[in-house]
Image: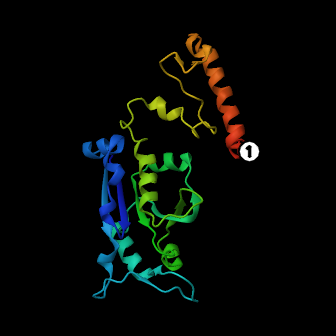
């Protein structure tokens, strides 16, 4: 089954962007997943192709109109489409590796890229849009956030990564940050590779890596340990 991604955006020319390169790009070319874009302005009804209006109650900026977004979503995701409908938004729930894996195990996703001050709440409610955030900061729009989400998902699709163990041992997969990595040369600027990694004792290596991961997580992301 091919993972199908449909992105609703005012800037379809931003895609595939980085998704056309490296692992994601190769998988796209091989048909492991597909990517379609929908121009939101195609669903405007006036000659100016207006998609936004001033916020009700006053305030700065503009808001994407409910009727226009609803038409775009209905076109991209007709009744019976099993794919989740996502809205990239800084007020959404933080994207986690667990949610990424859920998406990778599914049929795909329909992703709306927010712009301006946001999207009319009524269409979010009426079309069941799941708001997703990639971090506590503001971007100019949801396009880069959508690419981040899709990159995280696509690399987990079967056959995309050459060694699936690589994905299983990464940060957040075990609830902790990943341990440090080393490779040749054996010594760099007076710093050698830790002896345990050259010992050949796989049990001790695993114990060392877990201890290192725990130490890093305590120092940098203690919140992850609080959740365990």
Residue farthest to the right, as pictured: 226
Tell me which residue sits at (62%, 14%) in the image.
196
Which of these two is toward me, 149 or 105?
149
Quadrant (top left/top right/bottom left/bottom right) for the C terminus: top right
Give the left or right position of residue 85, taking residue 210 as reference: left
For residue 3, say whether it is visible: no
Residue closest to the eye, 54 or 188: 188
Secondary structure state at the residue bearing disc 1: helix
User: Which residue is denoted by mark 1 in the rendering?
Assistant: 226
Residue drawn where x is 30% and y is 59% of the image: 36
Please provide percent x and percent y for residue 146.
43, 58
Front-lying residue, 88 or 2 = 88
Q: Is residue 224 visible?
A: yes
x, y (%) of residue 149? Answer: 46, 53
Above or below, 8 against 191 in this view is below
How many numbered circles does the render carry?
Answer: 1
Q: Residue at x 57, y 56 (%)?
A: 135
| Image colouring | rainbow
The residue at the far front in this view is: 189
Q: Nearer the viewer, residue 104 or 55?
A: 55
**Which residue is painted at 42% across and 52% down in the image?**
150
Q: Position of residue 185 (x, y in %)?
A: 48, 17
Q: Quadrant of residue 9?
A: bottom left
Image spot of residue 165 (x, y percent): 48, 29
Q: Residues within 10 Å of mark 1 (few under 14, many from 20)?
A: few
Vertical placement of residue 113 versus 50, above or below: above
């Amino acid at each position: 089954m091919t993972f199908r991604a449909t992105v609703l955006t005012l800037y379809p020319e931003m895609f595939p962007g980085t998704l056309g390169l490296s692992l994601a790009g190769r998988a796209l070319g091989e048909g492991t997943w597909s990517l379609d874009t929908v121009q939101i302005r195609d669903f405007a009804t006036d000659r100016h192709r207006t998609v936004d209006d001033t916020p009700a109650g006053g305030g700065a900026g503009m808001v994407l109109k409910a009727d226009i977004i609803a038409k775009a979503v209905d076109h991209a995701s007709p009744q019976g489409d099993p794919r989740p409908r996502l809205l990239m938004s800084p007020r959404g729930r933080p994207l986690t590796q667990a949610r990424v894996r859920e998406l990778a195990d599914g049929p795909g996703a329909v992703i709306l890229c927010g712009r301006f001050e946001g999207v009319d709440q009524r269409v979010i409610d009426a079309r069941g849009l799941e708001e997703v955030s990639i971090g506590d900061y503001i971007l100019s729009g949801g396009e880069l956030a959508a690419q981040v989400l899709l990159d995280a998902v696509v690399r987990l699709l079967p056959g995309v990564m050459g060694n699936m163990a690589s994905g299983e041992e990464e940060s957040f997969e075990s609830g902790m940050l990943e341990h440090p990595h080393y490779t040749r040369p054996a010594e760099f600027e007076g710093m050698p590779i830790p002896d345990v990694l050259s010992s050949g004792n796989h049990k001790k290596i695993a114990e060392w890596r877990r201890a290192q991961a725990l130490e890093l997580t305590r120092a940098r992301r203690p919140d992850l340990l609080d959740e365990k």
